[in-house]
Amino acid sequence: MLRIPCPHCGVRDEIEFRYRGDASVRRPAGEAGMEAFLAHVYERANPAGWHLEWWQHAAGCRQVLKVRRHTVTHEIGAVGLPGDDLPLPEASA
């Protein structure tokens, strides 16, 4: 089970949160075309390592948070607000 440190409520269990998706995906520009929008909606990477995700503290403050999580170890590296910059660590060889 994940323990996510909410910046507003403190450390809470994963069951209080709702996963909201990949935080690194950017919506294509309006003139990008159908293929770009299909890729945006249906194609996602499945990285092994650090990843940025959106989580909502649904059973707490209801805020949407940006979380840096390791997809293999489930370690939480950082938690911030949507506008915060959470750089991903360099991949180790």
Image (cartoon, rainbow, N blue to C red):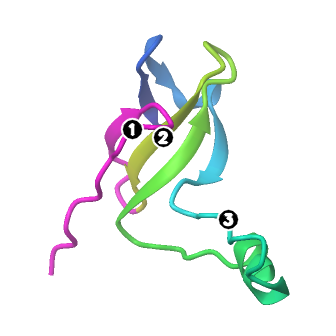
Q: Which residues are magenta?
A: 72-93
In the picture of the structure, the residue carrying the numbered disc 1 is 84
- At 40% from the left and 50% from the top, the residue drawn is 69
How far apart are labels 1 and 2 at the CA level?
A: 8 Å
Q: Nearer the viewer, mark 2 or mark 3?
A: 3
Amino acid type of the residue that numbered disc 2 sits on in the rendered structure: Lys
Quadrant of the rendering where the C terminus is positioned = bottom left
In the picture of the structure, the residue carrying the numbered disc 3 is 27
Residue at the left extreme of this rendering = 93
- Sequence-wise first label, 1 or 2: 2
Q: Is residue 77 above or below residue 24?
A: above
- At 51% from the left and 60% from the top, the residue drawn is 24
Image-based side of 55 in relation to 59, left or right: left
Image-based side of 45 in relation to 67, left or right: right
* Residue closest to the eye, 32 or 38: 32
Q: Main secondary structure of the magenta part?
A: loop
